[in-house]
Amino acid sequence: MADKMATREAYGKTLVELGGIYDNLIVMDADLSGSTKSGEFRKAYPERFFNMGIAEQDLYGAAAGLAISGKIVCASTFAMFAAGRAFEIIRNSIGYTGANVKICATHAGITVGEDGASHQTFEDIALMRTIPGMTIVNPSDGASAEILLKQVIAMDGPAYVRLGRAAVPFIYDADADLKLGKGNVIREGKDITVVATGIMVNEAVMAADILAAEGISTRIIDIHTIKPIDEELIIKAARETGAIVTAEEHSVIGGLGSAVAEVTARNCPVKMAMVGQNDTFGESGKPEELKKKYHMTAEDIVAAVRSLL
Amino acid sequence: MEISELKKVANDIRIDIIKSVHAAGSGHPGGSLSAAEIVTALYFEVMNIDPKNPEMKGRDKFILSKGHANPAQYAALAERGFFPKEELLTLRKLGSSLQGHPNMHYVPGIEMSTGSLGQGLSVAVGMALANRLDSDPGRIYTLHGDGEIQEGMIWEAAMAAVHYKLDNITAIIDWNGLQIDGRNEDVMSVAPIGEKFRGFGWNVIECDGNDIESVINALNEAKTVSGVPTVVIAKTTKGKGVSYMEDQAGWHGKAPDDEQYELAVNELGGEL
């Protein structure tokens, strides 16, 4: 196995496997099937793949129609155009109806890289979180993307699956025991907790190593399911470690940081710091350069931890 | 059903619309009244449906894309026996299944929750694709307002329906010429509607949308067309059947007061 894989690659590969299990699985795209990797499914099951052209509103409206007719639908495009452009169609025709549509959105966040600000979405989790009944999943690596996608397909109802463009290191084994709706403690620790999601889980692991050298014991939790969020695990971490840093490749407004703060504010307020896109647009550049410039690296997590201790 | 009987059903639906909107104290009588013959033709003559088995396999499905006209759809469903007529008077009230815009989970016979304009045709595309995959003979019908086709999403779906050769879709445009802010041509011109759809590759049929026979003929003709979807452009009068509401944009979205209510019911020959 390669040591790196983009979550979108895992998505395409897993779709092909799921196509053989679920006769009623339909995959759709809006002219980005090569990039989102939904095209892998098209090659295997052309009769169950529909390209809707560059028309994201129609993509999600038609996905609703297929799902209400008994199909499981994975409808893909870039996160910017799924959660952003098609928001109100997702809200009314998918969310309000409870249609079994999985919005599998790729190219989320700053690691879109060179395409720049118009394509780098930091708002999608915030938008999707406000829709009642919407499950939100943000896998951290290729293995968890596969494991969680299978669980998302097995459940009934709408879900938003956030996938990335860039290849990222594996964190999990293929048989990792991950459960939708349950956070995963990657490392125990007693001084502080870093709650991370998506590609920031790997940054959190690197941050914990740096902090360990300074004698700081950092608990790391992967919140791969942002909604419904694992309140119990977050409350426990807040009580036991007394401070939380959140880390996400998303705006610090409305995403994981907000979701965790909503839990702690209601249950056991603790000091918090949020690592993420700080209410600004991105720009073109290499993913690693951008992560550094916009403060979404292990070093930024370390700095946030130091600010709280 | 005989044409004379269908005309009576359409008139009863108009009375139901006035009564339910009056009881609600709000709602959209104008675009509901203009569509009375259209929903009558669909639910009483054209569609293969069973009120005793609303989820019947192979049934035809109707999506009210102009969801605000649901007093007409609710009345048609009640008249057809999907639910008791008394419920019509609960329209828009707290706890009622008859929401201000249709909810598919609350009312038997409602196939899609709508209300936000422009989404019904895309949903129809999805349903039509599903029916084709499943060799399901059911047709998908949609009803749109003329103002509604100003939504860009309608034209995305119009492209897709032709691309995928969805001849199991019949879209109907309730062309009453008015929208909330006034006449189409003053707000945002939609004419020529037929040429627009023809340009997209649709089969276009025009009919008198307030003449039950004309509507039925158009909808039946649409069933015989293969290879392309059909749009029926139904020329109607907004507020049809109530003298003071006819062709008045002001009656798009308000309920009649008690005096206006009595006048309307009397004009339609109903009992107060």
Image (cartoon, rainbow, N blue to C red):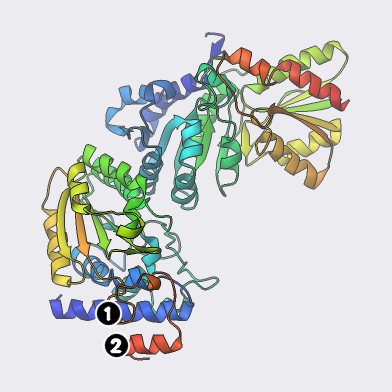
Judge from the rendering whether residue B73 lies leftward or rightward of residue A163; answer left or right: left
Q: What chain letter is assigned to the residue under label 2?
A: B
Q: Amino acid at mark 1?
A: Gly
Q: Amino acid at mark 2?
A: Glu
Judge from the rendering whether residue B251 lies leftward or rightward of residue A129; answer left or right: left
Secondary element at image label 1? loop
Closer to the camera in the image, A150 or A95: A95
Residue at horizontal 36%, vertical 60%?
Answer: B66
Q: Residue furthest toward the front?
A: B186
Circle 2 sits on which residue?
A: B267
Circle 1 sits on which residue?
A: B241
Q: Earlier in the sequence, mark 2 or mark 1?
A: 1
Closer to the camera in the image, A100 or B41: B41
Residue A45 in picture, x, y percent from top left: 31, 27
Secondary element at image label 2? helix
Residue B141 quadrant: bottom left
Residue B210 in picture, x, y percent from top left: 21, 71
Q: Are the residues tagged 2 and 1 within 8 Å (C-beta)?
A: yes
Residue at horizontal 15%, vertical 80%?
Answer: B4
Q: What chain letter is assigned to the residue under label 1?
A: B
